[in-house]
Every structure is written in C-alpha cells, then in structure tokens.
C-alpha cells in the first residue's frame, strides 16, 4: 500500500532518526565535516518511490527536486530496484519504467540526462541559447532556465550537486566525482551561471547529495591524482573528505556558506538506500533530479 510521510531526520551512525528542528552550521562546519553523524535535516517522502528533498531548496516554490533512493523500481539484482542507467547491464525496458516513475513523481514529461564522462563539460540549455539536443549529450553538468525540463544526474558514489538561483530562476545539476573535484567542475558551473545568465554567486543555493563519505573515500594513489592543496582534506592516511573539497570550491567561487546544504549520507555505508560502485561493483545508479516549475 502506498503511503506518504514527510519527517525531519538526522543521521546517527548512518541511521534515520526523527528530528525536531532544522540544524544550524557552525562557522567552520563545512570545511571540517569529517563526522557523518552530523544532523542532515532532510525531508523524506515515501510513496511509490522513496526520495528526499533539501530544506532550503524545498522552500523555493519555483523549484521541484528529489534525490531518489534505489527503492521502488522494477530492476532485478544486482540493479535492484530503481536503476536509472541504461549502460550498466540492466534490462532497458526496466530502466525505461523506472525513469517513467521518476518523471511522474517530479511531474515532468521531459527528463534530461547525460552520458557522464567524469570530465568538466558543461551543457547549457537556455531560452536564449541552443535548443534541447535530440540525442543524449555527453557531459557532467547541465544548466537551464527553461521550466518543465527535469535535469537528472546518475550516481553510485559520485556527488549529485543541485545549484539553484531563486532570483533569476536558473538551475544546474552537476555530476561530481573525484575527477570532477580535481577539475573544479563546481567552480566552473558557477562561472557559467554568472556568464550566461547573469547570476550572482551569493544568490545561489547549493545541495550536495549522498556520495562517498570521508569514512570510505580511500585513495591510495592520491599523490598521483590529487593536487597538493587537497591534502588539507585528508582525514586519515589515504582517506579524503570530498564533501569538504566541494564546499571549499563552492566557497572560493563566491557561494555563501549558509547557502550550502549537505546530505552527509555515505553511499558506500548505505547500500540499503543507495547504489555504491565501491561497495558493490556491478550495480545500478540512483537519480538526483531537479526542475524549474
């Protein structure tokens, strides 16, 4: 039986607990977020599908969004069950049904997604820019000011980052793995939003979804793949806080600390809710979706 409930929760040892009020961040909390038990204040919804929404984004009536779990779809193991990706070995018909479920939940007839390349390519679909592509484009970030176009990022440990300008009604959805952090794709997206749409960084609201947490983000070859300034974010030998890296890059781009929300959910720890390539190997991809109304 379908049911609907919205609750405030906090993370305690990666479990869901009821929470009575919205948390506040300390002045240095975003750059020192090494504890995955920090309160998240996420708004969870359970209907046919299970997903959550970020409080600051939820307060904007022009935006609809959801971070969907792996629960509620048609796919069979090891892709069980709400897999959003065609290219991981799942049955295409099952993926299509799953995407239709997400579209219905978001309330969109058009769901845009990318062939994600772990690079820094940014795709812009604006009312005064190029029209929507006929084929699935390659890239790792999408920006639009067109209402009714749901932007989806597919994940299994990488970050899905929603960036919204409520003043100019401009939306970006970003796929940011460790290569994205190395390429500073988040800073690049903020720059494009300013250049192409006249956005101001101080107006932007940013939400960073479930992804590989500092508890599990081990990179034994970090000296070869990370720039030296990433060493600031090493929480113990070979383990890095990529959430904090993203926050740092956003702050450098001019985003205000109080406008950044973190889910603080590690996908490798919570494979009951989300897909994790590191934990599972062959697996599906969950979807982070946002749309201008």
Image (spheres, grey):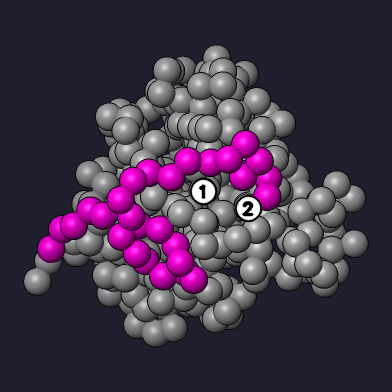
In the drawing, what numbered circle is on residue 33? 2
Query: Which numbered disc covers residue 225?
Result: none
Residue 105 in the image: state x and y as whole percent.
23, 52
Q: In front of the other: label 1 or label 2? A: 2
8 inside magenta stretch: yes
Q: Which part of the image, by quadrant, shows the C terminus?
A: top left
Q: Are discs 1 and 2 less than 8 Å apart at CB?
A: yes
Residue 215 rendering spot, x and y as whole percentages? 64, 69
Along the line of sight, which residue is nearer the eye, 2 or 118? 2
Q: Residue 255, image x and y in percent?
A: 60, 29
Find disc 1 in the rendering and name its residue.
Answer: 262
Q: Is residue 113 above or below residue 239?
A: above
Q: Earlier in the sequence, mark 1 or mark 2?
A: 2
Residue 84 x, y percent position in the rendering: 40, 63
Task: Check disc 2 and report its element: helix, strand or loop.
Answer: loop
* Image quadrant in which you'd find residue 44: bottom left
Position of residue 271 in the picture relative to residue 218 (left or right): left
């Amino acid at each position: 039986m379908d049911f609907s409930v919205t609750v405030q929760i906090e993370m305690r040892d990666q479990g869901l607990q009821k929470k009575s009020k919205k948390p506040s961040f300390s002045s240095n909390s975003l750059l020192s977020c090494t504890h995955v038990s920090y309160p998240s204040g996420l708004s969870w919804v359970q209907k046919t599908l299970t997903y959550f929404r970020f409080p600051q984004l939820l307060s904007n009536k022009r935006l609809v969004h959801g971070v969907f779990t792996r629960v509620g779809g048609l796919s069979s193991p090891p892709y069980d069950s709400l897999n959003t990706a065609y290219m991981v070995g799942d049955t295409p018909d099952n993926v299509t049904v799953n995407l239709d479920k997400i579209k219905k939940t978001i309330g969109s007839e058009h769901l845009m997604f990318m062939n994600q390349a772990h690079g820094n390519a940014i795709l812009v679909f604006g009312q005064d820019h190029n029209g929507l592509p006929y084929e699935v484009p390659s890239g790792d970030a999408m920006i639009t000011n067109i209402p009714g176009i749901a932007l989806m990022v597919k994940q299994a440990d990488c970050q899905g980052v929603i960036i919204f300008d409520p003043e100019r009604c401009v939306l970006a959805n970003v796929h940011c793995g460790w290569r994205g952090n190395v390429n500073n794709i988040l800073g690049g997206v903020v720059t494009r939003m300013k250049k192409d749409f006249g956005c101001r960084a101080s107006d932007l609201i940013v939400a960073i979804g479930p992804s590989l947490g500092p508890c599990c983000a081990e990179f034994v070859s970090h000296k070869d793949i990370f720039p030296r300034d990433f060493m600031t974010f090493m929480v113990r030998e070979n383990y890095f806080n990529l959430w904090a890296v993203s926050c740092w890059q956003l702050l450098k781009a001019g985003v205000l600390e109080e406008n950044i929300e973190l889910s603080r959910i590690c996908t490798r720890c919570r494979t009951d809710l989300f897909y994790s390539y590191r934990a599972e190997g062959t697996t599906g991809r969950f979807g982070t979706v946002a749309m201008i109304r």
